[in-house]
Amino acid sequence: MAWNVFSLLIALSSCIKTINLLKVNTSFGIIVDLVVQVFYDTLAFLGFYSMWLFYFCIVRALLGSNVDTKAYPQAGEAIASFMTEYRNSVGDITPPKYEFWVQEGITNNGFMIFLNQLYFIWFQVFMNIVLLNFLIAIIS
């Protein structure tokens, strides 16, 4: 474990040193400066985006939607939910599962299934169309 962390730190340090060496060349220096500026410009957006992902994870849990935890066998349900929402937000769409509401004896299950589907459509529109277009506008 310690060896892996040490190797990761060495690789990260090498990457930073290489980027600094690329600044010596005029044409590479401009590209490096632009990439660094885009990174700083998107930091606020990434915080906002993560906040909305966290919010949609909570809403999905409150609506009783199940998350496929088989895709992340070592992670808990909260991490699997966050990763599923992240994958949905970048276009790898996994529709919500609502086995809980399909069971016998639960009242108002049709309304809750409708709310789950409405949530899913709202999530796709907001995260994929609205926020990713903001990201494009920030980078431009």
Image (cartoon, rainbow, N blue to C red):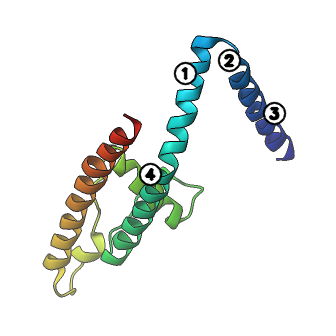
- Tell which circle, 3 or 1, labels the residue nearer the N-terminal end: 3
Residue type pointed to by label 2: Leu
Q: In which quarter of the view is residue 14 placed?
A: top right
Whole-number angstrom distance, CA of label 4 to CA of label 1: 21 Å
Which residue is denoted by mark 1 in the rendering? 31
Which residue is denoted by mark 3 in the rendering? 10
Mark 1 vs 2: CB contact within 8 A: yes
Q: Nearer the viewer, mark 4 or mark 1?
A: 1
- Tell which circle, 4 or 1, labels the residue nearer the N-terminal end: 1
- Label placed on residue 45: 4
Task: Classify 60 as above or below 15.
Answer: below
Whole-number angstrom distance, CA of label 1 to CA of label 2: 9 Å
Q: Nearer the viewer, mark 3 or mark 1?
A: 1
Give x and y (percent) for residue 85. Answer: 39, 56
- Label placed on residue 8: none
Give x and y (percent) for residue 75. Answer: 57, 59
Mark 4 vs 1: CB contact within 8 A: no
Whole-number angstrom distance, CA of label 3 to CA of label 1: 24 Å
Mark 2 vs 3: CB contact within 8 A: no
- Tell which circle, 4 or 3, labels the residue nearer the N-terminal end: 3
Residue type pointed to by label 4: Phe
Which residue is denoted by mark 2 in the rendering? 22
Whole-number angstrom distance, CA of label 2 to CA of label 3: 18 Å
Q: Residues within 10 Å of mark 1 (few under 14, many from 20)?
A: few
Residue type pointed to by label 3: Ile
- Tell which circle, 2 or 3, labels the residue nearer the N-terminal end: 3
Left or right: residue 51 compared with residue 3 = left
Give x and y (percent) for residue 12. Answer: 74, 34
